[in-house]
Image (tube, rainbow, N blue to C red):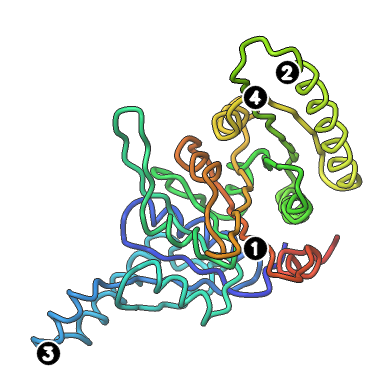
Amino acid sequence: MVLKSSVLCPIDFSDSSRGAMRYAGAIAVHAESPLTLLAVNDALLDEAAELTGGRSQLADDTRREMEKVRSQAFGERPGGPDVQFEVASGKPAPEILRVARERSSGLIVMASHGSTGFRKLFFGSTTERVLRETVVPVLVTPGGDTGPNGFEEARKAVRRVLVPVDLTPATSHQLFVTRALAEALSVPLLVVHVIEPVRSLIAGHGALSKVETERRARAEAELERATEALAGGPSVEGLLAYGEPAEEIAKVADDRDAGLIVMGLHSSPLLGPRMGSVTYRVLCLAHRLVLALPPLPAGGSAARSDAQFSDPDC
């Protein structure tokens, strides 16, 4: 798999972001792409430093800390990623999106920052906003994951790629990207469609059984066509599940030992790219790598848009 542009990894010097950096480095080396490490200083801290004449010193200190973290993660051995450093000031999410545009990044790799509460899980607001507004794929790494030492270790961590599909026109885009990933990683591919239950206000309504049967038959036929289109690539399996989509996706990922989930990000004609509720819930529930794919631009085609992910041997 060859990325035709840079890999961007925002870091905040937490253990989670160090893990994300190792994933980003493994991808960048394998793809022969530069890796940009980005640190965003708080604007108020920047202003305070400017008042004391130390604004440039703050940026220099941040860069030195970034170099230290890079050295700890990758060492000085040959064959490491080609790392470039960027220090910005402001709100993290807008700065991440700005640098991604200016650097023509083809992939953003960042950590989810999770904390647990009673029956709830949250991930970082920065990650959430980036996912709502990004126009390039974002690989979200789970909190507590220390990251791989190279691409081979990353491949072993993935084991299987799971791609949940809703069998809408966006499915072809997801499958195109996921097939390329599965081939590059030499791992099997599991295509999952979740059928949500039909809820009737009238208990035991006679038409409900017929509706469920028709939905299942239609979904089975469409899922079979989708998986048949992937023939000739990696090992592919289709699976129908029933229930609440996010919960079923997380359960299947656990049951089938899938280390990477490829999700689509929904779009709104008024608001532009945004994260759907299913993607949000999967990120909260599944302690897995999640690759979030933004919708194709208007008039775009899967083949043209996903050229940056193409494998030269395919």
Q: Amino acid at mark 2?
A: Leu
Q: CA distance from mark 4 to mark 3?
A: 63 Å
Q: Residue 297 vs residue 276: left or right?
A: right
Q: Amino acid at mark 1?
A: His
In which quarter of the view is residue 202 placed? top right
> Which sits earlier in the primary sequence, circle 2 or circle 4?
4
Vertical relation: 10 (above or below) 149: below
Residues at badges 2 and 4 in contact (C-beta under 8 Å)? no
Q: Residue 45 vs residue 262: left or right?
A: left
Q: CA distance from mark 1 to mark 3?
A: 42 Å
Give the structural element (helix, strand or loop) at label 2: helix
Q: CA distance from mark 2 to mark 4?
A: 10 Å
Tell us which disc is closer to us: 1 or 3.
3
Give the structural element (helix, strand or loop) at label 4: loop
Q: Which mark is residue 30?
A: 1
Vertical relation: 139 (above or below) 155: below
Q: Amino acid at mark 3?
A: Gly
Q: Residue at x 50, y 36 (%)?
A: 286
Q: Residue at x 75, y 29 (%)?
A: 239
Q: Which mark is residue 208?
A: 2
> Which sits earlier in the primary sequence, circle 4 or circle 3?
3
Q: CA distance from mark 4 to mark 1?
A: 42 Å
The quarter in which the C terminus is drawn is bottom right
* Residue carrying label 4: 197
> Which sits earlier in the primary sequence, circle 3 or circle 2?
3
Q: Residue 309 vs residue 99: left or right?
A: right
Residue at the limit of the structure toward the front, as seen here: 202
* Residue carrying label 3: 53
Tell us which disc is closer to us: 4 or 1.
4
- Residue 113 in percent (x, y) is at 36, 49
Residues at badges 1 and 2 in contact (C-beta under 8 Å)? no
How crowded is the residue under tag 4: few (<14 C-alpha within 10 Å), some, or many (20+)? few
